[in-house]
Amino acid sequence: MGANFQNFPCLPRIRTMYPQFSEKEKAIADYILNDPKKIIHLTINQLSDDLCVADATVFRFCKRIGFSGFQAMKIALASEIVAPIKDIHETIKENDTEIQITEKVFKANIRTLEDTLHLFNEIRLEEAIELIMNARKIEFYGNGGSGVIALDAHHKFLRTGIQSVAYTDSHFQIMSASQLTEQDVLILISHSGSNKDMLDVLQIAKKNGAKSIGITHLAKSPLSQKVDIPLFTASQETDYRSEALSSRIAQLSIIDALYVNVMAKREKSGQESLQKMREAISMKKL
């Protein structure tokens, strides 16, 4: 699966991987998500009969989501049900108070961060940091809500001493991508991973030899398959809150993690750059 699912609960695994499942796998996933308690009392034969699929299809599904087999998945489900992970993605109700709604939003953000942390692939993270460390210039691209994340990333990485820029306009993005070189790194932020503008600039950047990092949600999106290093977020959708809204918190945290790691590795040069910036900013204060 690429990501580290060793300690990732079963139900979040299924939700996170759902978009990349086949139709038969989605039928199995829906069955489990709709009534996980029922699954722990079924045999693999009973489940396959209910869904009109082969036992082997159910077994392969269990393997795909990181378990050794059907029994191992049932054990994981049982532990979640006995000591349930509180579902903080509750639907907002009409009679909810302001503080109840606020609590649900905060808890949803916390869950998104926890799920994203479980998804982290340590090797990919190290590779991304290494690319940034060796870059002549880093360019951050994002459109819409992702554009705000790109600007925040630029704001942080200015402190590292590595040349940085962010573009949120598709025309500027494609123009700048045409000037990238093998010494540059492009970081594309797209929740869906299927934004045409992002894919167009990635194609141009790759022609010029630039390396690329993608921050996205769907593990099998076009963007995640085409960038050199994909980094994934995990989030869920509710009636009042889209996945993209929730994923912003995770995207910002990934940027923060990259920034702090780079600053830690740059040591003296990073601190010198940071000190210069602090001195310059101090001129703006009374």
Image (cartoon, grey):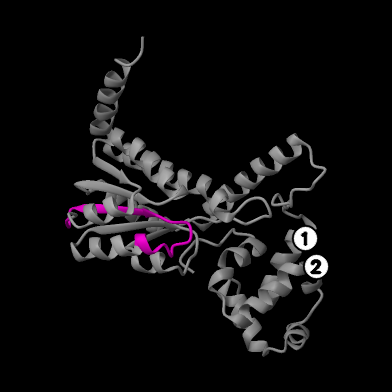
Q: Which residues are magenta?
A: 181-198
Amino acid identity at mark 1: Ile
Q: Mark 2 highlights which residue?
A: 37
Q: Mark 1 highlights which residue?
A: 81
**Foreground residue among 61 and 200:** 200
Q: Position of residue 63 (x, y in %)?
A: 58, 76
Q: Position of residue 271 (x, y in %)?
A: 28, 29
Q: Does 142 appear in magenta?
A: no
* Residue at (28, 19) in percent of width and height: 279
Q: Earlier in the sequence, mark 2 or mark 1?
A: 2
Image quarter of the C terminus = top left
Q: Residue furthest front?
A: 171
Q: Secondary structure at mark 2?
A: helix
Q: Does 191 appear in magenta?
A: yes
Q: Are marks 2 and 1 in contact (CB under 8 Å)?
A: yes
Is residue 193 toward the left or the right of residue 50 in the image? left
In the rendered image, the vertical position of residue 277 relative to residue 114, given as above or below: above
**Foreground residue among 82 and 35:** 35
Q: Secondary structure at mark 1?
A: helix
Q: How far apart are the two marked residues, 2 and 1, measured between alpha carbons?
A: 7 Å
Q: Position of residue 34 (x, y in %)?
A: 75, 68
**Foreground residue among 3 and 189:** 189
* Residue at (55, 70) in percent of width and height: 19
